[in-house]
Image (cartoon, rainbow, N blue to C red):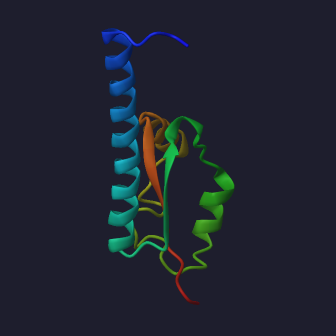
Amino acid sequence: MTPLTEGTFLQTYHDRELLFAQELMTVAHKVLASTAGATHAAIVEAGGLAVHEWVRENCLTNSCGKSGRNWTCPPHTGELDVLGDRLRSYARGVLVQNITPL
């Protein structure tokens, strides 16, 4: 076992504080999303996000009736490559899902 020095104590304390802050932010984002009416919410690593043309095409069929009326729907989302770059420019994000009855 490594002896506890002032440096290792401070690093351990800092690591625990950082972990606590990250967990607190996760809970806070989920509560805020839920309060705003989201069905589900999760913190995601933005670097792994991808945008796909088939999603845009599905949106443009307007099966939900919101295409062109919602800022998160085409055409308001812009070009896919620009949207993907914008999403991946963040470290993390909140993925929100809304489920509404048909």
State whether residue 71 appears in this view.
no
Where residue 3 appears, as percent x and y from the top left, is 45, 10
- Figure quadrant of the C terminus: bottom right
Where residue 12 appears, as percent x and y from the top left, is 39, 23
Q: Residue at x 57, y 75 (%)?
A: 62
In this rendering, position of residue 65 left or right of residue 63 = left
Q: How many marks?
A: 0
Q: Residue at x 58, y 68 (%)?
A: 60
Whether residue 9 is situated above or below residue 99 in the rendered picture? above
Q: Residue at x 68, y 57 (%)?
A: 54
| Front one among 2 and 54 | 2
Report the residue that reaches farthest toward the right. Answer: 54
| Front one among 68 and 23 | 23
- Figure quadrant of the N terminus: top right
State whether residue 25 appears in this view.
yes
Q: Residue at x 51, y 47 (%)?
A: 44
Whether residue 12 is situated above or below residue 33 in the rendered picture? above
Q: Quadrant of residue 13?
A: top left
In this rendering, position of residue 42 left or right of residue 50 = left
Q: Quadrant of residue 11?
A: top left
Where residue 26 appears, as percent x and y from the top left, is 41, 51
In this rendering, position of residue 75 left or right of residue 71 = right
Report the residue that reaches farthest toward the bottom. Answer: 102
| Front one among 76 and 93 | 93
Q: Quadrant of residue 99?
A: bottom right
Whether residue 71 is situated above or below residue 67 in the rendered picture? above
